[in-house]
Amino acid sequence: MTGKTSTAPEPPLAMLAELTHRCPFSCPYCSNPLDLERRSQELDTAAWREVFDQAAALGVLQVHFSGGEPTVRPDLEELVEHAAGLGLYTNLITAGVLLDEARVGRLAAAGLDHVQLSIQDSDPAESDRIGGYQGGYRRKIEAAAWIRAAGLPLTLNAPVHRQNIEHLEAIIDLAVELDAERIEVAHVQYYGWGLKNRAALMPTRAQLERATEVVEAARARLKGILVFDYVVPDYYAHRPKACMGGWGRQFLNITPSGKVLPCHAAETIPDLEFERVPERDLAEIWENSPAFQRFRGTDWMPELCASCERREIDWGGCRCQALAITGDAAQTDPACGLSPRHADLVALAEAESGREPPAFQYRRMTRPEPAEA
Ligand code: SF4
Ligand code: FES
């Protein structure tokens, strides 16, 4: 089955623009691929501007400037200004440590709508250890103050895992102190570097249940002060998430070199080929490329999903997780309790979370990047 749809799909709601894979941090749960793209492969300013033109013409509404660390790019302000000028909602996803007050002001003046600032832990030493960047915590706290002083709305991104989950209450308190309007408490997802470090990151079921209680209590206590987004780990779920809102339905991801992906981990699926912008028009890729067609809709589904009443709710879960666990991206996501592989997934989570965590394998370029000119 090809999963080919006869009518043109709706335009995507959002585009993740990975401006670069370069990053001063080395977080062991990074969702970037193990084989990071290098600076010499990155699209230049003119090419990104054209990509945003094509995105706006396609009907994309939101652009998330991401990476790696997008503030590594000196042309970030120009790109934000261009995207905002096209009427796109612009969101910056940043670790914050390369910002200074003047640059935050320039980004706000360029039309930036929102900032998501990541934090590794509420404890400064632990935050720096987990991110692999000494002094990072202090600089993030400074960045948060500049962001709010510039009048930009702030979301604190808090990836949680077994090595910081006991600090969740303090992380939520920190979000309030920093005057964030929203916190994303996201249990780490096991893609890219996160998959490589799964045994060091997987919480126990008891830790997950406690974290859920903490979030629910804080959500009630902080109503009207802080909005919560809570993402639970798939391995302990009964039904899978609708990954990316369904393959090729709402979302696309542009890598630093211009490859257009249906999700950030799609390159792990071995038989898919990805086309590039701006050479090929984004609308053409979205509507017609075989990679987007492959798992769009329901035609591709195995019988278990095809006959299930949730098939247009979760769209069969995550293709990349199905591949990682079963070796076949076209299987039902094992996060689904109906999958014959679900018990394996739960056993794996319980076994890994029950052992001493191994040392982190920090994110790094697998082939060292040549020194900058
Ligand atoms: Fe979703 Fe497929 Fe599980 Fe049904 S069987 S709940 S469609 S993953
Ligand atoms: Fe690729 Fe879920 S991350 S489909």
Image (tube, rainbow, N blue to C red):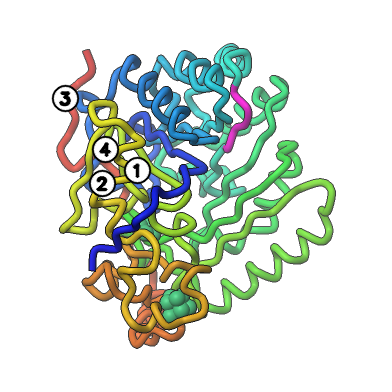
Q: Pointer 2 and pointer 3: residues touching (CB < 8 Å)?
A: no
Ligand 1 in which quarter:
bottom left
Q: Pointer 2 and pointer 1: residues touching (CB < 8 Å)?
A: yes
Q: Position of residue 7 (x, y in %)?
A: 39, 52
45 with respect to 211 (left or right): left
Q: Position of residue 100 (x, y in %)?
A: 56, 18
Mark 1 or mark 3: which is in front? 1
Residue at position x 17%, y 34% in the image: 368
- Look at the numbered disc 2 and say if its residue's Cβ is closer than 8 Å to ligand 2: no
149 with respect to 109 (left or right): right
Mark 3 or mark 4: which is in front? 4
Upstream in sequence: badge 3 or badge 4? 4
Visible residue check, residue 71 = yes
Mark 1 or mark 4: which is in front? 1
Kind of residue indicated by mark 1: Trp
Q: For label 3, count other residues whose C-alpha is less than 10 Å away and answer few (under 14), some (14-19) or many (20+).
A: few
**How many numbered discs?**
4
Q: Which residue is mark 4?
A: 259
Upstream in sequence: badge 1 or badge 3? 1
Whole-number angstrom distance, CA of label 1 to CA of label 3: 34 Å
Residue at position x 20%, y 54% in the image: 272
Q: Is residue 174 magenta?
A: no
Q: Which residue is mark 2?
A: 289
Mark 2 or mark 3: which is in front? 2
Q: Which residues are magenta?
A: 112-116
In the rendered image of this protein, does residue 255 appear above or below residue 327?
above
Q: Which residue is mark 1?
A: 286
Q: For label 2, count other residues whose C-alpha is less than 10 Å away and answer few (under 14), some (14-19) or many (20+).
A: some
Q: Which residue is mark 3?
A: 370
Mark 2 or mark 4: which is in front? 2
